Image (cartoon, rainbow, N blue to C red):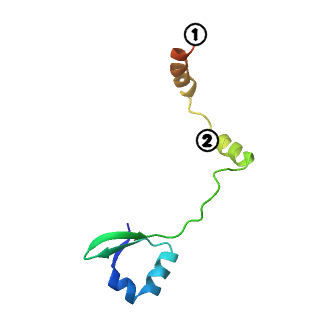
């Protein structure tokens, strides 16, 4: 995690803590030196869907593992009548 900060410190230095979190820092909020919450930068929720052109580019860049077909054959054979 990032730095730890007490509730009192948060109350007295709220603007500084918010600025640190806005800059990407993660802060652990403590009460009596025990962590009770994490203050983390907000992340916009993104759609799980991507354009097909993006997916094609990822697949083209990554390529297949040379042993992929052998691994798939090992899995496929017990499930089908065909070798």
Q: Nearer the N terminus, badge 1 or badge 2? A: 2
Q: Quadrant of residue 80?
A: top right
Location of residue 69 with respect to 62 vertically, above or below: above
Q: Position of residue 24 (x, y in %)?
A: 49, 72
Q: Label 1: which residue?
A: 81
Residue 42, given in percent of the width and then of the height, sits at 53, 69
Label 2: which secondary element: helix
**Residue 75: percent from left, percent from top:** 51, 22
| Residue drawn at 37 percent across, 69 percent down | 37
**Residue found at x 51% / y 15%:** 78
In this view, 18 is above or below 35: below
Quadrant in which the N terminus appears? bottom left
- State the mark number for residue 62: 2
* Quarter assignment of residue 29: bottom left
Give the total of numbered labels.
2
Say few, some or many: other residues with alpha carbon within 10 Å of mark 1 (under 14 / 14 to 19 / 20 or more). few
Q: Secondary structure at mark 1?
A: loop
Q: Is residue 68 left or right of residue 60?
A: left
Identified at 41% across, 88% down, the residue is: 13
């Amino acid at each position: 995690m990032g730095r730890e900060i007490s509730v009192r410190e948060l109350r007295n230095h709220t603007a500084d803590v918010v600025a640190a979190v806005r800059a990407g820092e993660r802060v652990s909020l403590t009460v009596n030196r025990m962590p009770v919450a994490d203050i983390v930068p907000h992340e916009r929720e993104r759609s799980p869907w991507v354009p097909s052109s993006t997916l094609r580019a990822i697949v083209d860049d990554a390529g297949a593992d040379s042993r992929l077909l052998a691994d798939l054959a090992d899995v496929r054979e017990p499930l089908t009548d065909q070798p």
